[in-house]
Amino acid sequence: IGTPEEIFIIWTLLITILGYASCLPVGDDSVCTAEEVAKYSIVFVGKWSQSAFPKQYPLYRPPAQWSSLLGVTHSSDYNMWKKDEYASNGVRDFAEKGEAWTLMKEIEAAGEKIQSVHGIFSAPAISSGTGQTFTELEAHSRHSLVSFVVRIVPSPDWFVGVDSLNLCEGDHWKEQETVDLFPYDAGTDSGFTFSSPNFATIPQDTVTEITSSSPSHPANSFYYPKLKSLPPIARVTMVKLKRSQLGRLGPQPNLTAVGNEIDDSVSETPLDCEISLWSSWGLCRGTCGKLGTKTRTRYVRLQPANNGTPCPNLDEETECEPDNCV
């Protein structure tokens, strides 16, 4: 077994290792042994165009746009938001109203209590559905995860974002990371459309991804049952800055090219015509003793777009025996 001195040394070494391990982030972020600090440019590109998302596309009061981006670099001890879990009060306020105060307080509290947050970063809002915004962020070897949220405006409580994306791979930082973004529902408001009035979800639901078939309701603004999946509504690219680029805020030349390429290749989602049910048949008109005609009508609920199925005839006529004949 060994001498008492050898056992004591081994035991001390084991305690030291365990103590070190307990300080490391747990979960999907394996231990990062890269250099302590890395800086990245982050470019958010909106792809929310009328051709890609023609259904109920907001054109005014307000038109389609994006809120400011709010993000954080952190360890796995902290989650800004997570799919299938309940949104915090801060995420609720941000997703519903674009108010960042409560979320900022939650981030600061997490940083103070468990030292799980390294830094906060933000980028300006985008005043249209397509366009880009950018900023810089700093990651740390013990805080190598990135999370952020951007509110979809207008919407009940919808947002896009990234949850705990790891910028570190073992002994090195990733040079570049690009992620396609899709809409999420914060689970705090039950509105179906971009312009729905405020309608609190009671009890609160979990954060869920909005897809082309879920929620499965024809009124939903993202409901495209013929699509297997929605096209990306946004994209984010993070590029590690070289030392010579530090402090030079703004997208690098290659990122600007990427942004233009994205804007030029926006998807076109076919939107089929949607019509109402038939009305009741009208009165039968004609001469007594002869066959007359009666009609019924329907109306267009949603005009087709992008080569979607065109609208059928909106009125129909059939023969009948005239009414009120003596």
Image: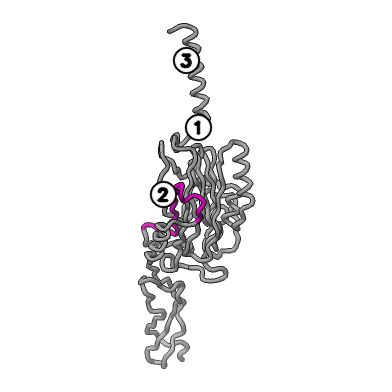
- The mark that comes first in sequence, 2 or 1, is 1
Q: Is residue 152 magenta?
A: no
Q: Mark 2 falls on what kind of element?
A: strand
Relative image position of residue 36 (x, y in whole percent): 49, 38
Q: Residue at x 52, y 25 (%)?
A: 19
Relative image position of residue 71 (x, y in whole percent): 54, 49
Task: Classify mark 3: residues with Cα within 10 Å, few (<14), some (14-19) or many (20+).
Answer: few
Residue at image mark 2: 177
Q: Is residue 234 magenta?
A: yes
Left or right of residue 116: residue 312: left
Identified by mark 1, the residue type is Leu
Task: Classify mark 1: residues with Cα within 10 Å, few (<14), some (14-19) or many (20+).
Answer: some
Q: Is residue 235 above or below residue 30?
A: below
Residue at image mark 3: 10
Residue 191 visible somewhere in the drawing: no
Answer yes or no: do the residues labelled 3 and 1 have beta carbons within 8 Å?
Answer: no
Q: Residue at x 44, y 86 (%)?
A: 284
Measured in 3D between alpha carbons, the distance from the residue under mark 2 to the one under mark 3, in whole angstroms, is 42 Å
